Structure formats: structure tokens, C-alpha cells
Image (spheres, grey):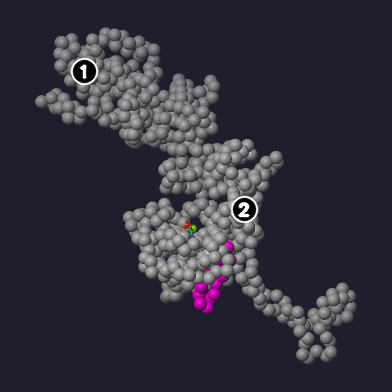
């Protein structure tokens, strides 16, 4: 016997001892594996002319034996070699989501959630089975092998017989206990309902032998008075004539039961049906099964296009981001079908990057089955479909934003970052498409608002849209530069996502033509908020105090490009702004990136001439006390950085300087 790998063992323990009530999903998992195996063989046949296959023969068969309590799922798919049985069923470490599953199982000790959250795969069989036997014959091989396990310590592999390529997974159900009854899983009714519920749209027939009744041709009655049983022709004649009393009508019809293989799943793809004929529950079930999510989607919508290019699309917006959405391993794409047959699991070309979270299927009879990756990229039909899908998604999101704000906010929390990246990555070209889908926190209204709502609430004298960027709204709100703008009666969008600033900078403005409003970071040195009078005043002061600023600039060295008088009103003695294209926030984010070290903002120290400290500075300058001016410059600059949430270069020197003032 071979032992299970540690990771597999962990998951198995979870399965066997699970208190999870949704055990019935084991059948969905086994059927989906069977369907995958059939897909694999079918795909192989598309490119390998040695594989002679009749699509109509591909199928999955479910059977049960109530007496010995077994359930079997068989397929005539690609099958497994001895090595594959060992690798695929003996270890599950090759699955990415598993590492995640087991890690988190340890942390949370919450089995129920883990099983619910992920497709649990083959091992889910052990939720209902005390032992599992898998007999498989790989396509093209004449050997069959059996894998067997009680799911506890390990498994064994031994030679077996199988007439044809494919796999049988045979479960022996667990014994019933006082609390648990497993019998239903071996009944025709139980299995049929599970197939219908979870696997209705599997694109291969799922067949099961079902019991049926039929009327038996009547036998001659023993006490009949010579009235022979009429044959079928006679009966028809009687029925038509309807004059003489009908002998057969007086006889009780007799029935017999018989068993027959029947296709249980509808196979009519759900996306081909009219939306009005499909219940929300059916859509949700389809989504969860096909896209391995445990939560219902936030939004479901479809496109039925007819004409030169006809196709059906069924699209879902998940209610939460998959755990790997922002990792480089995440693959976007929609399943692509041509007349019900899957061509490609994830066709990237159908979705723009910023809608990478959308799941769904596209089915077009106008696409060729043998379409290859290379031709796809240049396929005009595909591009047309993608364009329409993109428009549809945008429209649906706008609808959600208008009709169900709460749900939209959840959506934005999950996926908003991607939309902003979309604008940034396109150098702002996509802003018309996406800007109206963005939400930002309003300092004035204390809630999330759209840019349109911001503009709608602006007073006539406000020209620009103001925003501040930083780590938390609470801290941003207290920034002197934010308070300064708020004091003017203007709202400020408090942005906490790392992408916000980059998105705004590539947008530059919001709105069309004459209605466009510039987007301005309140921490920008070029912020034009002051009246002409204030500006003139500041200019005059700057001129008067040239010598003072020179000493201060000299004390601060390269840290700042300039020291000057602030023209905007504020309560603090001084603050820092950025003059060039790189804002303080961008510098902060970029400095955390591998290549971002050298990128510096051009800082300006702006002094508040109305603050008492300014008078102290002037005094010191007038008295020729350069040491004092230099000390103050240093302290004011570091204080300003601290308020901005920026790191200061030499905290010890700063503390010493403050202490020096105290003593
Ligand atoms: P997943 O389906 O997510 O890969 P599973 O645990 O369900 O994970 O299955 C593990 C692997 O076992 C599959 O990837 C496949 O290689 C193999 N397998 C399972 N069932 C079958 C089957 N019926 N036919 C062929 N291979 C199978
Ligand atoms: Mg599976």
C-alpha cells in the first residue's frame, strides 16, 4: 500500500470527518471529472487524426446497487494510466487551490467553510463512501488498472480489466449511523435529483438506468367465453367502429416494470434559453457549478445576438473576488463554445483586462470548431463579440450603480481597483468608458460618491475636482491641505487605494468639452485656490522675505526645491506640497516598489504668513540669528512631513531639535 502525501491526508481527514451537510456535492464533483475526461479525449481528437471518435458516443453513466450499497460513475473519456492514477488520485498537492485550502483549514479550524468555498474534487467521494475503487483504462492503452482506498492511510494500485477506454469510480457507501443515513445516494430517485440539480447542463449525456412501467399486451382471460384476445388491428377496428361492445375495454390493463438507460440531464445549454424561462436559482446553480464559486453571483445578464453574426452570451459578475485575482497567475476569459461544444475554457480575447473578473460563456454557431489560438487574435467576429460584451458589462454596471447602490459598493470594493488600473494602463484613453463607474470617499458627505455626483454638488465658483491621497480617510481628513480646501467650502475626495493617484493623473480631467473639470491633488504646489488678492499678497511677502527663505532653503538642502509663502489659508505654520508631476503619494508608493527608489517628488515648503511662528522667523532673521532660522526650518519641514504621513529622514535629529527648544 502506498501512503497518501501529507496534504492529501489533511484534506481526506476533512472529508471523512466532515460535519458538512452538503455531502451530496460528491456526485457533482465526480460527474465534472468524468466530463473533463471526456472533454480531454474530445479535444485530443480535434488535433490528432489518429483518434477516431464519434461525438455521439461520448457519455457518462451513473448506476447504483441498493443491495450492496454502491454508486458508480463511469465515463468513456481519456482514462488514466497506472502512473496517472498514482499521481492524480494519490496526491493533490499539484492543485494550487489545495495548498490554500489546507493552510486555511489549520488556521480557522472551520471545515464547513473550506469545503463550501472550493470545489473539493475527487476526495469529496469520501464524504459518503467508506471505500472507493477507480478502474481506468487510458485511451490507446490495452491495460486497465484499479486504484483502491478506504481514504484513511493510503491506497493500492493493481491490474484490472476494462473493455474500453475510460474510468469507473465505484463508491461503497458508508454504513448508516443514528444521525446519518446514506441510503438515498444509492436510490434512483436520489441520484436523479442530484444530477438534475447540479449537473443538468453538463454537455455530455449523463445516463442512468431507470425503472419505468408500461402496459403489457393483454393475455387471453382464463374465464373468457371464447372471446379471443383481439390483435392490434382488430382493436383499432373496434375502436373506430365503436358500435359493438368492446371486449378489451372490459379487461383491466396490466402493467409491468422494466429498466432502461435514460439521459437525465437536459444538456440544452442554459445560455440558449430565453432569460424569462430560466429562474434566478437555475442561473445561480449553473454559475456555481461551472465556475466553482460557493456564492451566488452579484449580477447575471445575457446577450442573444442574431443577424450576420449570431451568438448567445451568458455573463456573471461574481459577488467576491477570487483569492488570486490580483496575482499574475490569474487568467481572465470566457468559455467559448461553437454550437454547444466547448472550444476553449478561457478565451482571453473576449474580455478587456479591466473586466477580468467577469465569468461566463459565449456560444456562436458562426465560429469554427477548429479555431486556433493564433487565428483567434485576428478573428474579426470574435473582436465584434468582445466589443459588444464590453459595452454590455459597462451598461449593466451602470444599471447596478443606479438601482442598487449597496450592492454596487460591494462590487466596487471587490473590483474597483481593476477599473482604475484600466484607465491608468490606457493612459487615460478609457476614462470615458470607465470614469462614471468609479466611487470615491467624499470628505464632505462622508460616503462614497461618483465623480458625477461630486460635480453635481459643486458650487458655481469651484472649477476643479479636488482629491487627496493617503493611507486612511481618517488621517487624510485631518491634513492641513485638505482642511484648507474644505474651509473654502469645496469637497475633497479622500483616496486610499494605491492606484487612485495614478488613475487621476492619467485622466487629468473629468467631464466632456466645456464641462470638463480638472482633477487636482490638494497636495500639489500648483493648486490654484487663492483669490488674486491672496496671490498678490503672497508674492509681496515672498519678495520681502527673500533673504529669510534663502537661509531656510540652504538649511534644508536638496530636500526641498523651494521655500515660500503659502497663498492658501491654513491653520498650521507650514506644509509641504509637490511641484512637479510626481506627487508625494506617488513617491511614497513608488519608493516601495523594486525600481522605484530614485523617483522623488519636487517638494516645496510653504509657510503660513499669518501664523505666529512666521513672525518669530522674521525676527530671528532680522536679528541675524541664522542658527535659529536653520533650526526652525528643520523642525517645520519635518513636522510637515509627519502630518502628511511621509517618513522623515532623521527622526533622532528631529527629536533632538525639538528637545533643544524645550530646554
Ligand atoms: P480537479 O478536477 O480539480 O483537477 P480532482 O480532485 O477532482 O481535481 O481530480 C484530480 C485529478 O484526477 C483530475 O485532475 C484528473 O487528472 C484525474 N481524474 C479524476 N477523475 C477522472 C476521470 N474520471 N477520468 C480521468 N481522470 C480523472
Ligand atoms: Mg474535479
The verdict on residue 69 being magenta is yes
The tag on residue 401 is none
Nearest to viewer (mark 2 / mark 1): 2
Q: Main secondary structure of the magenta part?
A: strand
Which quadrant holds residue 303?
Answer: top right
Q: Is residue 600 visible?
A: yes
- Residue stretch in magenta: 61-76
Looking at the picture, tell me which residue is in the foreground, 605 or 379.
379
Residue count near mark 2 (Cα–Cα under 10 Å), binned few <14, some 14–19, many ≥20? few
The percent coordinates of residue 591 (x first, y second) are 32, 31
Please state which of residues 270 and 59 is positioned toward the viewer in this rendering: 59
Q: CA distance from mark 2 to mark 1?
A: 80 Å
Quarter of the image containing the N terminus? Answer: bottom left
- Residue at the (38%, 32%) spot, across then down: 494
Residue 49's disc is 2
Q: Secondary structure at mark 2?
A: loop
Tell me the quarter of the picture where residue 633 sits: top left
Residue tagged by mark 1?
555
Location of the C terminus (image quadrant): top left
x and y percent of residue 653 in the render? 17, 27
> Is 504 in the magenta?
no
Q: Residue 213 in the image: x percent, y percent? A: 67, 75
Amino acid at each position: 500500500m502506498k501512503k497518501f502525501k501529507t496534504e492529501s491526508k489533511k484534506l481526506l481527514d476533512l472529508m471523512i470527518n466532515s460535519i458538512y451537510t452538503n455531502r451530496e456535492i460528491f456526485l457533482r464533483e465526480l460527474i465534472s471529472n468524468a466530463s473533463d475526461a471526456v472533454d480531454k479525449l474530445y479535444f485530443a481528437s480535434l488535433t490528432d487524426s489518429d483518434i477516431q471518435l464519434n461525438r455521439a458516443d461520448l457519455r457518462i453513466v451513473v448506476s447504483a446497487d441498493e443491495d450492496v450499497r454502491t454508486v458508480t460513475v463511469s465515463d468513456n473519456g481519456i482514462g488514466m494510466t497506472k502512473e496517472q492514477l498514482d499521481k492524480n488520485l494519490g496526491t493533490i498537492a499539484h492543485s494550487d487551490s489545495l495548498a490554500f485550502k489546507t493552510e486555511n483549514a489549520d488556521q480557522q479550524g472551520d471545515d464547513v467553510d473550506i469545503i463550501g468555498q472550493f470545489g473539493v474534487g475527487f476526495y469529496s467521494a469520501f464524504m459518503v463512501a467508506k471505500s472507493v475503487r477507480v478502474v481506468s483504462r487510458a485511451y490507446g492503452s490495452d491495460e486497465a488498472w484499479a486504484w483502491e482506498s478506504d481514504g484513511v492511510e493510503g491506497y493500492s494500485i493493481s491490474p484490472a480489466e476494462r473493455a474500453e477506454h475510460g474510468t469507473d469510480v465505484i463508491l461503497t457507501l458508508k454504513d448508516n449511523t443514528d444521525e446519518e443515513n446514506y441510503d438515498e445516494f444509492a436510490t434512483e430517485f436520489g441520484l436523479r435529483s442530484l444530477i438534475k440539480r447540479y449537473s443538468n447542463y453538463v454537455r455530455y449525456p449523463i445516463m442512468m438506468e431507470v425503472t419505468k412501467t408500461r402496459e403489457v399486451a393483454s393475455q387471453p382471460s382464463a374465464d373468457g367465453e371464447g372471446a379471443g384476445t383481439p390483435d392490434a388491428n382488430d382493436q383499432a377496428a373496434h375502436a373506430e367502429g365503436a358500435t359493438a361492445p368492446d371486449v378489451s375495454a372490459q379487461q383491466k390493463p396490466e402493467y409491468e416494470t422494466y429498466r432502461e438507460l435514460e439521459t437525465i440531464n437536459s444538456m440544452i445549454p442554459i445560455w440558449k434559453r430565453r432569460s424569462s424561462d430560466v429562474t434566478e436559482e437555475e442561473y445561480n446553480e449553473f454559475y456555481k457549478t461551472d465556475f466553482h464559486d460557493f456564492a451566488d453571483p452579484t449580477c447575471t445578464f445575457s446577450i442573444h445576438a442574431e443577424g450576420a453574426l449570431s451568438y448567445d452570451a451568458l455573463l456573471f459578475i461574481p459577488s467576491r473576488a477570487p483569492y488570486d485575482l490580483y496575482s499574475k497567475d490569474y487568467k481572465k476569459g470566457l468559455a467559448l463554445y461553437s454550437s454547444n461544444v466547448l472550444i476553449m475554457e478561457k478565451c482571453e480575447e473576449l474580455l478587456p483586462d479591466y473586466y477580468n473578473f467577469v465569468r461566463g460563456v459565449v456560444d456562436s454557431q458562426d465560429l469554427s470548431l477548429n479555431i486556433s489560438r493564433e487565428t483567434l487574435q485576428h478573428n474579426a467576429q470574435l473582436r465584434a463579440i468582445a466589443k459588444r460584451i464590453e459595452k454590455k458589462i459597462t451598461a449593466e454596471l451602470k444599471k447596478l450603480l443606479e438601482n442598487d447602490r449597496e450592492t454596487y459598493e460591494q462590487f466596487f470594493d471587490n473590483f474597483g481597483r481593476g477599473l482604475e488600473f484600466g484607465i491608468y494602463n490606457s493612459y487615460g484613453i478609457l476614462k470615458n468608458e470607465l470614469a462614471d463607474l468609479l466611487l470615491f470617499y467624499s470628505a464632505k458627505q462622508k460616503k462614497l460618491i461618483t465623480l458625477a455626483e461630486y460635480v453635481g454638488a459643486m458650487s458655481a465658483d469651484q472649477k476643479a475636482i479636488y482629491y487627496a491621497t493617503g493611507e486612511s480617510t481618517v488621517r487624510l481628513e485631518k491634513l492641513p491641505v485638505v482642511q484648507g480646501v474644505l474651509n473654502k467650502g469645496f469637497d475633497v475626495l479622500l483616496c486610499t487605494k494605491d492606484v487612485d493617484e495614478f488613475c487621476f493623473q492619467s485622466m487629468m480631467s473629468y467631464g466632456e468639452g466645456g464641462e470638463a473639470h480638472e482633477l487636482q491633488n490638494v497636495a500639489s504646489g500648483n493648486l490654484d485656490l487663492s483669490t488674486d488678492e491672496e496671490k498678490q499678497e503672497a508674492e509681496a511677502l515672498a519678495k520681502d522675505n527673500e533673504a529669510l527663505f534663502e537661509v531656510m532653503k540652504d538649511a534644508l538642502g536638496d530636500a526641498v526645491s523651494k521655500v515660500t509663502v503659502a497663498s492658501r489659508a491654513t491653520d498650521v505654520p507650514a506644509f509641504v506640497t509637490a511641484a512637479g508631476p510626481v506627487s508625494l503619494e506617488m513617491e511614497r508608493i513608488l519608493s516601495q516598489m523594486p525600481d522605484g527608489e530614485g523617483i522623488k517628488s519636487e517638494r516645496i515648503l510653504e509657510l503660513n504668513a499669518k501664523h505666529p511662528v512666521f513672525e518669530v522667523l522674521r525676527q530671528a532673521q532680522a536679528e541675524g540669528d541664522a542658527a535659529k532660522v536653520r533650526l526652525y526650518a528643520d523642525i517645520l519641514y519635518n513636522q510637515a512631513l509627519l502630518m502628511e504621513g511621509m517618513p522623515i529622514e532623521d527622526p533622532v535629529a528631529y527629536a533632538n531639535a525639538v528637545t533643544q527648544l524645550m530646554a
